[in-house]
Image: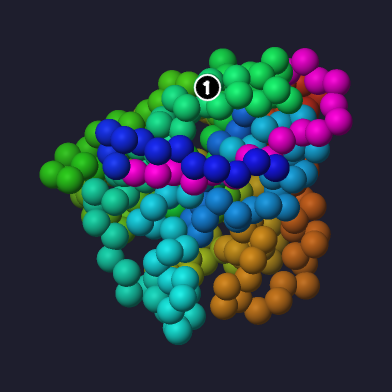
Amino acid sequence: MKRGEFVDSSRDRAVPYKAYVPVDHDLDRVPVVLWSHGFGGNRDGAAFISRYLASYGYLLFHMTHDGTDSSLWEGKPEHPWDILRKVKIARETTLARFEDVPFVMDQLPQWVAENDDLKNVADLSQFGMSGHSFGAMTTQVMAGQMFPNVNDELISMRDERISCGVLYSPVPAGHLKTGKPPEELYGPIDIPLLHMTGTDDSSPLEDFGYEHRLVIHKHAQNEEQYVQVLEGGDHMVYNGTRGKLTQNPLREQHEDEIKIAALAFWNAYLKDDDRAMAWVKKNL
């Protein structure tokens, strides 16, 4: 595991990172998967997923997005969710979050070159992208979803270096009130995505249930869209924490199902594994 931060002097902005790396391996190629946290989260989330994937030969690169991270609630007396419900995020802050992703990818060649255990094996020719909740929306935007700029004009922030992605609790864009039909918002998504949600995956901060999370899957133009719906799965199972949710007796089972599906998807699309692809097409 490696920690640090990249500083974008052009934006006067730091992007802390945490990297999960394979150890004691004889791999000749290690694909890179980016991970983006949810609202009020940070680079430490979803560790159970990334430790597992790293053990199978992946470099998982987590980033913290200033302005939408855990600094919004840390050190304050109220419960984090109560604080976050009151926070209003400016459009500029959201766009800055999205801009963190290409910035981090720009830094990785030099970072990899400075790490002897990775410099000869990390594959930077393409990236996988993933994230939870707000991080899923960040992934959606990198995959081609249209998003309103500060003038409410729909723009694309698609980064062609990202070839596939996993959405842990996809986020529909209804709260943005763009007035645009879903096919115009999500239609430009042009890469394979795995959409993960659960029947109890309602939004902790807004009033919508898990069914609305599948609108992205329905309208993406790329036909290689896969879905995993966990029976009884809730919003926080993907982050490895509970928030205000009660204990989930199915948590261990759900975590296993999440890890297995994610590994199969990445193996299929980042390692060209035919057996994994057959599993994905049969089970997702």
Q: How is the image coloured?
A: rainbow
- Does 68 appear above or below 120? below
- Taking the magenta stretch, the answer to whether it contains residue 25 is yes
Badge 1 element: helix
Left or right of residue 74: residue 166:
right
- Does 255 appear above or below 111? below
- Where does the N terminus fall, quadrant-wise? top right
At a point 65% along the width and 41% down the height, the residue shown is 2
At a point 60% along the width and 76% down the height, the residue shown is 245
At a point 77% along the width and 30% down the height, the residue shown is 57
Q: Which residue corresponds to mark 1? A: 110
At a point 40% along the width and 71% down the height, the residue shown is 84
- Where does the C terminus fall, quadrant-wise? top right
Q: Amino acid at mark 1?
A: Gln
Left or right of residue 136: residue 280:
right
Residue bounds of the magenta highlight: 13-29
